[in-house]
Image (spheres, rainbow, N blue to C red):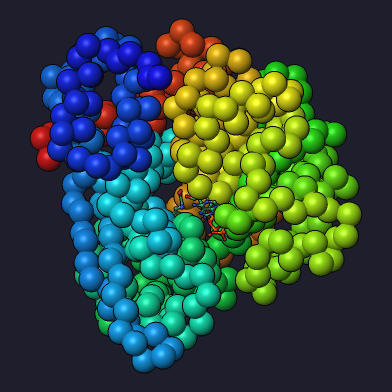
Amino acid sequence: MTTPMDEKIEPIYQEVLARNPGEVEFHQAVREVLESLGPVLVKHPEFAEHKIIERICEPERQIIFRVPWVDTNGVVQINRGFRVEFNSALGPYKGGLRFHPSVYLGIIKFLGFEQIFKNSLTGLPIGGGKGGSDFDPKGKTDGEIMRFCQSFITELYRHIGEHTDVPAGDIGVGGREIGFMFGQYKRITNRWEAGVLTGKGLNWGGSLVRTEATGYGAVFFVDEMLKARKDSFDGKICSVSGSGNVSIYTIEKIQQLGGKVVTCSDSNGYIYDEKGIDLELVQQLKEIERRRIKDYLNYRKDAKYVKNGNIWEVPCQVAMPSATQNEINGKDAQTLVKNGCIAVGEGANMPTTPEGVKIFLEAGIAYGPGKAANAGGVATSALEMQQNASRDSWDFAYTEDRLHKIMQNIHKDCFETAEEYGAPGNYVLGANIAGFVKVARAMLAMGVV
Ligand code: NDP
Ligand code: 2IT
């Protein structure tokens, strides 16, 4: 069930399929963007003439490497590392690192491709890239995590740098891992180069609000969509999936704006707490003790844990998928709409399948796609780079205000672009076109490179 593509663009997509066999997530991400670009080529025939779309679909550089390390039992382990430097028209490659056993080239390429347009939407000077490994951090000791990160950066260090490529966190990579990687980079290069990684600790070059930024930003984006419909978060029942970095600060900001979050989850099951999720408890379990979400029940007896359950069956007015790709399928989208969901804001990258997206758009609900809604994380990474470059650090209120304004601008840009292209309220089209056009103009100006 896919939307037909413009006749000039269909062959480009077929070429992407042929050149990148088996990379289904990458195909999905490319298709979703290309489906929006037909009307852009009508307005800008120069983009077709200079093969901008063909060039954008081909990463500038792809690095795949061995990551050997020794576990606590003295056994040698081997993982595979990736960094896809996708597009540097607007600035140094920028994007997170994902450590998860499901990682392979197709996942990193889908994330890197999305990152190009997301980073463009922030209005800040950052290109698109992504990396990671099939390493599984679950159940590993701190020593194992450190040795893995050191080995990973011992290869990656030669490809990154404050003006070249600036990694950060994603699934399985947070402050602890960034610390180990920064330490090893500093040791190998003999440089205290703050701007090489973002998401650093607050006392060694990190930025206030970076930890909160993706979740807060996603809620600011949904708040703007609601405002455009003369509505607000106040009193809304909300469902958030995941219980990691993005989920936690999504829950916090929704609660600050008067909404009530009744769910959170991990890959084993979900929690339903009718009284509203106890965020301090989730933070204690996940950020400090690194436990599983089912342990929530040990402290909140009235809550429910549904093992392997489908979180989207819980009725809500606002849904914020914040775990992983393709977590909402067509049937889930139908269930959400049927149960009265009026807004969806994607904290995760590509959490809704193409069937699900179609259902949200046809239902006319406020649907904020990941590349717009979750851009606050990378935007605040760019603010961290600004602070590093000027050897300055900003206070929380100022930095949060910058993030808030960036999210308001992204919303406005997507909203107005959708109107300009005759699809009012369609943030998918708005985000894809607005993100693409800025990159395309820069590529055109720079010649065939
Ligand atoms: P974390 O590692 O902090 O948390 C990930 C959460 O998602 C965990 O609860 C995890 O559960 C769950 N999860 C991960 N993989 C799966 C899976 N295959 N099936 C079900 N649940 C899963 O990562 P983040 O919070 O940083 O990232 C969450 C999402 O947000 C990702 O899509 C990421 O790409 C996106 N994102 C992150 C940004 C950031 O700044 N961190 C910025 C923009 C987007 P479990 O513990 O069981 O694995
Ligand atoms: O998907 C994303 O935008 C991120 N994981 C954050 C990237 C970053 O460089 O802060």
Position of residue 216 in the picture relative to residue 60 (left or right): right
| Most foreground residue, 426 or 191 | 426
The N terminus sits in image quarter: top left
Residue 374: x and y in percent read 53, 42
Figure quadrant of residue 293: bottom right
- Residue at (38% x, 68% y) in the render: 135
Position of residue 206 in the picture relative to residue 17 (left or right): right
Q: Is residue 447 above or below residue 1?
A: below
- Residue at (55% x, 63% y) in the render: 207
Is residue 129 visible from the viewing direction of this image? no
Position of residue 140 in the picture relative to residue 365 (left or right): left
The C terminus sits in image quarter: top left
| Most foreground residue, 362 or 236 | 362
User: As drawn, which residue projects farthest toward the left?
Assistant: 448
Residue 39: x and y in percent read 33, 12
- Residue at (66% x, 28% y) in the render: 336
Residue 77: x and y in percent read 32, 79
Position of residue 292 in the picture relative to residue 385 (left or right): right
